[in-house]
Amino acid sequence: MKKFFLLFASLFFFKPQVGLSQNTVGLLRYTPEKSSEGYNLFFPHNQSTTFLMDNCGNIVHTWQLPDTMRPGNAAYLLENGSLIRCSRPNNIINDPIWAGGGGQFVDVVDWSGDILHRFERNDEVFRLHHDIAPLPNGNVLMIAWEKKDAPSAIAAGRNPQLLPQQELWSETILEWSPILDSIVWQWEAWDHLIQDFDPSKANYGRVQEQVGKIDVNYDEQDGHPDWLHCNAIAYNPVLDQIVLSIPHFNEFWIIDHSTTTAEAKTNQGGNFGKGGELLYRWGNPKTYLRDQDTTQQLFFQHHTRWLHPNAAPDDPDFGKILLFNNRIHPDYSTGMVIPTPLDWSTQSYTLDPDKAFLPDSASQIIRHPEADAPKDQSDGLSSIQRLENGNWLVFFGRWGYGVELTPENEIVWEYVVPLRAGKPVPQGTSLSSNNNLSFQMTRYPISFPAFDGKDLSQGSPLEINPDNSLCLSTSLNPPRTFAQNAFRVYPNPAASQVFVDNYSKEKLHFVRLFGIDGQLQREWTPIQDQYAFDVSTLNPGFYLVVTNLGVQSLIINR
């Protein structure tokens, strides 16, 4: 009894020291009143489970693959509750095409984990890799390497000196219909090449004059076959356009999806009238201007996305791009917002002759506020997302480290994936770079339709010997009074069921039940203004009912 009242007093009369926890993995910091509530989806490397986690670090749902499978690499949650996931076998020894990010399968999986639809591509010519983009009509855009042998590459104008392995991998975008189980649209980079190396070969011309084409001899990888290494794809339904991240060119491209497959092979057709040629490119003007004095902005970027894909033409965010700039500095990585020079009236991206595409620089840089933080540089993987409340969720993939930043650059949530070589580690473990590498992390708001009717209350932390006290204390930051006028808990004492009635004007977002030892016993979210909670399996004793509206005590007595 004395221990309970000491805990109770500390909750109401002392402000928690946010971020001073000794945790090294799992949840490190949490200020819920400033954080964007939701569930975090991630699919770490070196293991086969996709995780859905609440902001307290509790794993509330998982989708399991066989132990022999690995990420390949992205996973996304759909509004209907299905998961769309990329994967590959762990054994890659005999694969004819392999590089980091390689995949093989794209699965549509229901909430229970059953595979509803599957697409596979990994053969002598094509291999799926990295990322996908679910479309509003249920189709899926997929990235695939397309291997060309040396004679084909040379015939296309490739310098033979840039073919040390006698092959070159181009990129193909495939649109798959799971319902029809067929490819319904396709775009190939190989259809849009330019070269000024050999006038006797195909695609010869002036690179500077055809900025919508791809210089087949631009090379920063010492002739490695993975010439482009497209690592991200995203779709804009308002524009009907696709953005592609091309890190080996240190730029991103925008192409037209409104074309037919036949038009996508040409420079005519589609809403912007350029067929499958690049409508816009940004990050490294040397790729098309051959001007060594131009300023490079991107450095092996990842997770290139439309900042607000559903923004209308009159929205300030219309056409803006958000990305993670991995290697912009040896000591840190950043997020960037790029406002494209999109002219809606002329259906074009403005470009002055003999100049690079605008803008000259990003309009916004998002950087970790702690300059000496070792985890704020990731030379690969990683992601960035703008959340519903305007915060940024930045995920440093090499470290498995996620941080939520307010617009004022205040840290309000921190999490380290508690895995080493795919296995959970105990709280207190110090992890190094690549111990827990993960491709990306995506947060879905509590209101996301996939969660309707789902029980997400029985989660627990992924790490071994977890410490939940940080989430308990920061759930009450700043501390509230008893909130007797905000909500009511009854009956109290209770035996099997407890009801919570909400009398305030605020919505009741969550209810958490803590024991006197500070351990989270139950969590229910999302909930209605009147809700019944089952406590029949809990031991008799004193508990705290913690909500976003305040705190009340509860006695369970049978």
Image (cartoon, rainbow, N blue to C red):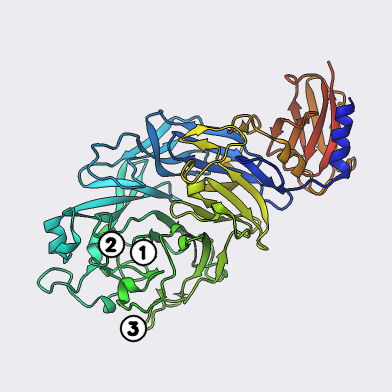
Pick whichever, 276 or 9, lies toward us: 9
Q: Nearer the N terminus, badge 2 or badge 1?
A: 1
**In this figure, which residue is indicated by the disc labeled 1?**
256
Q: In this picture, is 7 found above or below 307?
A: above
The residue sitting at 13% across, 72% down in the picture is 198
Vertical arrangement, residue 169 with respect to residue 521, above or below: below
In the drawing, what numbered circle is on residue 195?
none
- Residue projecting furthest to the left: 200
Q: In terms of secondary structure, where does tag 2 sit?
A: helix
Which residue, given by chain and number where applicable, does mark 3 sit on?
354
Q: Nearer the viewer, residue 498 or 228?
A: 228
Which of discs 3 and 2 lies nearer the camera? The answer is 3
Residue 532 visible? The answer is yes
Image coordinates for residue 139, horizontal then vertical, percent: 39, 47
Mark 1, mark 3: which one is toward the viewer?
3
| Mark 3–mark 2 distance (CA, rounded to whole Å) | 26 Å
The part of the image, by quadrant, that contains residue 484 is top right
State left or right for residue 445 relative to residue 309: right
The image position of residue 205, as x and y in percent, is 19, 76
Q: Amino acid at mark 2?
A: Ala
Q: CA distance from mark 1 to mark 3?
A: 23 Å
x then y, percent, for residue 126: 25, 47
Q: Disc 2 to disc 1, how far (Cα)?
A: 8 Å
- Write down the residue under mark 2: 264
